[in-house]
Amino acid sequence: MTVSHRAVNVEVFPLELPFVESFRHATSDRTACDSVLVKLTLANGVVGWGEGVPRAYVTGETQATMVDHITGPIAQGLFARTWSEPVSTGDLLTIGMRLPTVSGGEVLASNAAHCAVELALVDALLRSANTSLGDILIAANEKVLYSAAITATTVEGTEKVAKRLKLVGFRDWKVKVGFDDDDERLKAVRAIIGPDATLRIDANGAWTLEEAEEKLARWRVHGVETVEEPLGRSRRADLGKLKAKKLAAISVDESLVTGADAASLFADRACDLLNLRLSKLGGLASTLRFATTAHGESMDYQLGCQVGETAILSAAGRHVAAHLLPRYVEGSFGAHLLAEDIGDRPVTFGHGGIGNRLSGPGFGVNVIEERVRAYATSTHSVSNGSSR
Ligand SMILES: [Mg+2]
């Protein structure tokens, strides 16, 4: 028998959760986790937690638009119907599809807001059934192999972080580029990680076609396997030309937000790899759908993360990664990056960058509400159509 529930309350917590000291100094572009967490309560009293991370340069969302969308149209859609406990991947897709997504103004799609509510709803429904996400997204592998990721903006900071992460024993590495001193940066990283490690770079759309060609040709000496988002959304039309040069595998991140983006990328085969991220794409359902489509199109993909995400997104990502076996997986930095995580157990990678499959109700991590409240810059609540 299908068991259905009604959501009675949604609380929204925009966070400012500082990074650990060493990362704060090494990365000048971001010094704190700015996730927005959602606490969703069902009529039976069971609570679920979700998380989304606003990135204005990706979906156009900010903490403020997330709060507006979650307490407005998304909560309306949530309260308007009953929700069945999911027992299959198809049920997860249905839940995600039935929650509204908003667009307009600066917002390309309210995917981070959608992700936060969808995760909270799925977590609550799974907990009502006393089941784990892993009971539905059956793990193809007990272990997930994470990549090291370096987002430092100086060469000195890059070296410092690389040396620290080298101790973990990662096989796969990704480095943020797009700065004047990238030559020095990549030389330093390759020297630290050794010749056998795989190296990806992320340009976050910094280059023109000509710049990308020139740099990638020069950096062949550093063994750059993949370049992520070399050109950006505004130069998307040039991506196929860059791919044809075969200077490195081409991955897309900011240029893949909507279903229309994916359709266009598949149509002209403009890339080799998709960077799927839960918050960017709107949560579990849309990420699973993108992955299924990619399989059908014989397109490879990786599962990315948001820098500074908490244990909620890391745990959900861990389940998805164990189920899908993407080419690369990023995330689970947890207490390596955050001054304090908000879960009752660490969701971080261990030696070799390995994360074990999580068990336990929901996503397998229990949120410590006092910590969330301590790092929240405000709280917003909406129940049965009334907000305060
Ligand atoms: Mg990226």
Image (cartoon, rainbow, N blue to C red):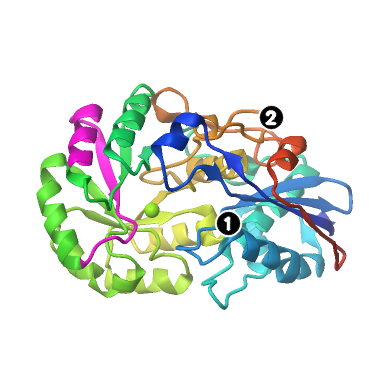
Residue 155 in which image quadrant: top left
- Is ligand 1 less than 8 Å from the beta carbon at label 2? no
Q: Nearer the viewer, residue 356 or 79?
A: 79
Residue 252: % across, % down: 34, 60
Residue 365: % across, % down: 67, 35
Residue under numbered circle 1: 283
Up/down of 28 relative to 52, above or below: above
Q: Residue at x 61, y 41 (%)?
A: 17
What segment is highlighted magenta in the picture? 184-208
Residue 122: % across, % down: 70, 51
**Residue type beneath disc 1:** Gly
Residue under numbered circle 2: 344
**Residue type beneath disc 2:** Asp
Is there any visible trace of residue 338 in the rendered image? yes
Q: In this rendering, would 16 be left or right of 378?
A: left
Residue 134: % across, % down: 61, 40
Residue 352 in which image quadrant: top left
Helix or strand or loop: what does disc 1 sit on? loop
Q: Residue at x 15, y 66 (%)?
A: 210
Ranked by sequence position, the earlier of labels 1 and 2 is 1
